[in-house]
Amino acid sequence: MKICVIGGGGAIGGYLAAKLARAGNDVTVVARGATLNAIQQFGLMLHMDDEPRPIIAKVKAVERLSEVETPDVVILAVKAHQVGPVVDDLAKIMGPDTVLIPMQNGIPWWYFQSLPGQYENLPVETVDEGGYTMKKINPKNIIGCVVYPATYSESPGVIRHVEGNRFPIGEIDGTVTERIQRISQMMTDAGFKSPILEDIRAEIWLKLWGNMTFNPISALTHEHLEGICRYPLTNDLARSMMTEAQTIAEKLGVIFRVDIDRRIAGAEKVGKHKTSMLQDLEAGNSLEIDALLGSVIELGRITNTVTPYLSTVFALTKLLNTKVQTSQARLALSMA
């Protein structure tokens, strides 16, 4: 297939691009700066523990979406706040049958599209102000996806895989179509696990349940997952936040397949792992707090659900993010 990976030089985008290219697909990545130069000169390099040598993928690397020919598949592997700046150019390269696979954390802009009920086609303002992206992108082109692998960028054009290969996918109207079966097979052929789900929103909530809780708590405390789960007060806080989120999700018709105890226990088992938000804080990067937590609070307002714990943690983390961005600083403390 002809595949375009937007954010193809990033941790998840690069991981996908390298393996999809090795499987024989025609892959173009959109990247910038030193990453673009490195990929153009040396290829896209992926290190995996179960591979004796790094994968060096020869992909086409471009700086602007306008340089991309209409693809069969677009993988949108950028953070939620980076979608808006590319959406106009994205809409221009998509054909009527192009499949778009957004891979953002948090509540996606398309959440209420193709979702019958009182909230159908309601924009999620926190991640899509004025519903601009929703208006520009035809929901019929979208396949939902949840990203589980852990990867990071070692250097420009060099990606390190840590663990995991699951990318569950689902049509946003819940149907099982011929095209989603093709996409699942494409991912499988590249070495990923992409089961087809009839309720992709429930899977989004399952991952978000942990992300919206442990990411901001870790940023505020500089603690890893194991420490947050084992310290009684932060364990209680996480539990209270997850209870509020579960109430919101269940009002929207979501059924959780695990309970809070099991979700927290799963986070603890990850061990002394720094969350992505803590890593962003230490690197001086903008924190993905609006998509992970602000969007959930917005859905709380929509469903008339009070969110005192979520709102408090959101306010504290937003202020932290503002201070770090304003001072252009990095903030890192040693961990025991």
Image (tube, rainbow, N blue to C red):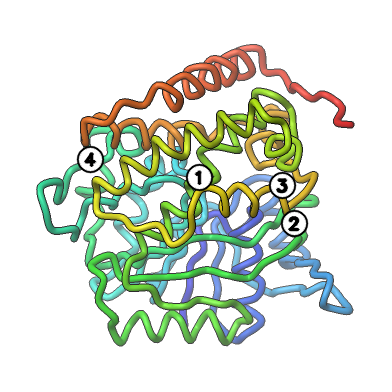
**Residue 180 x %, y %:** 36, 80
Q: Is residue 36 left or right of residue 88?
A: right
**Spatial CA span between label 4 and label 3:** 33 Å
The three-letter code of the residue at mark 2 reads Ala
The three-letter code of the residue at mark 1 reads Lys
Counting residues from the start of the chain, the first of labels 4 and 2 encountered is 2
| Count of marks placed on residues | 4
**Spatial CA span between label 1 and label 3:** 19 Å
**Spatial CA span between label 1 and label 4:** 17 Å
**Spatial CA span between label 3 and label 2:** 6 Å
What element does badge 3 sit on?
A: helix
Residue beneath disc 3: 34
Counting residues from the start of the chain, the first of labels 1 and 3 encountered is 3
Q: Of circles 1 and 3, which is in front?
A: 1
- The relative height of residue 68 versus residue 97 in the rendered view (above or below) is above
**Residue 241 x %, y %:** 47, 33
Query: Residue at left 21%, top 36%?
Result: 303
Residue beneath disc 1: 79
Residue beneath disc 2: 38
What's the mark number on residue 131? 4
Q: Confirm whether residue 314 shows in the render.
A: yes
What element does badge 1 sit on?
A: loop
The three-letter code of the residue at mark 3 reads Ala
Query: Residue at left 75%, top 42%?
Result: 226
Q: Of circles 4 and 2, which is in front?
A: 4
